[in-house]
Image: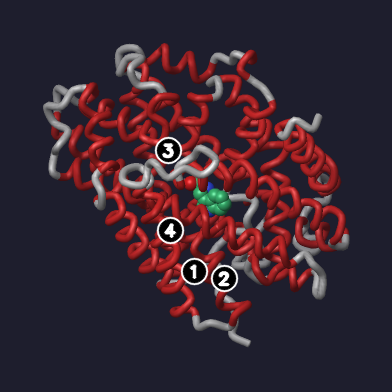
Amino acid sequence: MKARENFGSKFGAILAAAGSAVGLGNVWRFPIETGQNGGGAYIIIYILCIILLGYPVMMSEFIIGRKSRSSTAGAFKVLAPGTQWKWVGRLGVLTAFIILSYYAVVAGWTMEYIFLTLTDQFSGKSVADYGPMFNDFVESPWKSAMWTVVVFIVTMYVISRGVKDGIEKYAKILMPMLFILTLVLVGCAVNLPGASEGLEFLFNPDFSKINASVVMNALGQAFYSLSLGMGALITYASYFGTETRLRKTAVNVCAIDTFVALLAGCIVFPAMFNAGYSIKPDDIGPSLIFVTLPNVFQQSFSGMPILGYIFSVMFYLLLLVAAVTSMISLHEVVTAYLCEEWGMPRKKASVLVTTFAALLGVVCALSFGVLSDVRILDKTFFDLFDSVSSNYLLPVGGLLTTIFIGWYVDKKVIVDEVTNENKLRHASVRIIRVLIRYVAPIAITLIFLSQLGVI
Ligand code: TRP
C-alpha cells in the first residue's frame, strides 16, 4: 500500500485545518447572517453553538479521521464495515459537491474585485455607487460565470500539489497574512464616522429577535464556518500525525475561526452604518461585503489613496486565498470519494469533479442574472444551495457523526485518540464524551424539531 501523506508538523496541521475553516463563511456569510438575525443576540447564540456543538462535532470528525486514516467516503466503512453508516460518508460527499459549486461563485466575485481594485475603478466613487456596480457585475450574463470557472482552475492547481507542499505550505504563509490584514482593516473601520453604531449593533444583544429558526441558523452557520458536518475535517484529520493533539487542535481551530468572524463583523458593521441605512443586509443579501468594504477603503484612506489602493488589492487577494484553501477541503472530499470508492485515478477524478462542480457553479452564478426568474421553493439556485446545505445537510451530517462516535464506535477509540494512546491527560475525556453522546445530538435534534414546528 502506498504510504499516506501526512502534514509535516503539529502547527502545520492546525493551520491547515484553520485554512479550511477560515474562509468566505467568516468574512462574507457571517456578517450577513448576523445582520439579518439580530446582531449581538445572534452572536451569543452562535458562540454557544461553537462551544457546545461545534467543538464536539469537530472532535468526532478528528477521531474518525485519524483513527480510520481514511477520507470521509471510506472512513465510515473502515470503522463500521458492512453497515449502513457508509451513507453518512456519502451524504457528506453530496453536501461537499453542493457547497463547492456555489462557493466558487463568491470566490469568483473576489477575483472580479481584485481586478476592479487593481485597475483602480473605485477611486472617485461614492457610497451610493458601490451597490449598482456590484449589481451590474453579477447581472451581466457571463462575467461572474467566467470567474467561477477561473476559480475552479486555480483550485485544481493547488490540489494537484498535494498535502504537504500544497495545502500545508500555502496555509502557513497565507493564514498569518490574512490575520494581520484583517487587524489593519478593523483599525480602519472602527475609526470611520458612525462606526460606534455599527459596533453597538454587533455587540448589544436584543433577544427579542431570537426564535427557533434563528437558533437553527446560528447552528448551521457555526458548522459552516468550522467546516463541519460533511467530513472535510475527517479527511484532514486522516493526515494528522500521531503526535498531533486533537483537543488542542480543535480548541485552536474553533478559537481562530470565531475570532476572524468577529473581526470581520467589526469591519463590516461599522462600514455599513457609516454608509448609512441605505445598505442593509436584508436588502442586499450576498453582496454585503462587496458593497460595504470598498467604502471603507475609499473613506479611510481618502488622504492617502495609495494606501487605500494597496490595502484593497491585498484584501481581496487574501480573501480569494482564504476561499481557495476552503474550496480545497471541499474538493478533496469529492475527489477522494471517486478515487477510493470508484477506483478512479486521482487526476481523472479531480478533473471530473472540477468539470461538474464548475457547470453547477455557472448555473448558480447565472442565477443572479439571466436565470434569476428560475425559482425552486421560491429561491434562486444560489440561495437554494446555500440554505439547504447549511440549514439542513450540515446539521444532519453533524448529528449522525456524533451519534456514530458517541454510540456506535467503541469507547476505547475515543479515549485512545483523545489521549494519543494514554500519553496525554485523561481529565477532560469524560466531558468531551458527554458532549458527543448527549449534548450535541440532543440539542441538534431539538433545534431541528422546533424549527420544523414539531415541538
Ligand atoms: N468553512 C469554510 C468557510 O468558512 C467553508 C467550508 C470549507 C466548509 N469546507 C467546508 C463548509 C466543509 C462546510 C463544510 O468559508
Q: Mark 2 — residue?
A: 6
Decide: few, some or many residues near mark 3? Use Cα within 10 Å; few <14, some 14-19, many ≥20.
Answer: many
Residue at the image point whose x is 59% and y is 25% from the top: 42
Sequence-wise, the earlier of marks 3 and 1 is 3
Q: How many marks?
A: 4
346 to 362, vertically: above or below: below
Cα distance in 3D space between marks 2 and 3: 31 Å
Can you give x and y, in whole percent of width and height, for residue 207 in the image? 64, 15
Calculate the distance from the C-alpha at mark 3 to the C-alpha at mark 1. 26 Å
Percent of width and height locating residue 5: 55, 74
**Element class at badge 3:** helix
Precedes in sequence: disc 2 or disc 4: 2
User: Any atom of ligand 1 within 8 Å of the CB at mark 2?
Assistant: no
Indicate the position of residue 15 as horizontal and vertical percent values: 51, 53
- Do residues under tags 3 and 1 come within 8 Å of each other at their CB atoms? no
Kindly check if marks 2 and 3 are in contact, taking CB atoms under 8 A apart as contact: no
Q: Nearer the viewer, mark 2 or mark 4?
A: 4
Question: CA–CA distance between discs 4 and 1?
Answer: 26 Å
Q: Which residue is mark 3?
A: 28
Residue type marked 1? Val
Query: Which amino acid, mark 3?
Result: Trp
Residue at mark 1 to residue at mark 2: CA–CA distance: 7 Å
Foreground of the two, 389 or 422 = 389
Type of residue at label 4?
Leu
**In front: mark 3 or mark 1?**
3
Q: Quadrant of residue 167?
A: bottom left
Find out whether the residues at labels 1 and 2 contact each other: C-beta distance under 8 Å: yes
Sequence-earlier tag: 2 or 3: 2
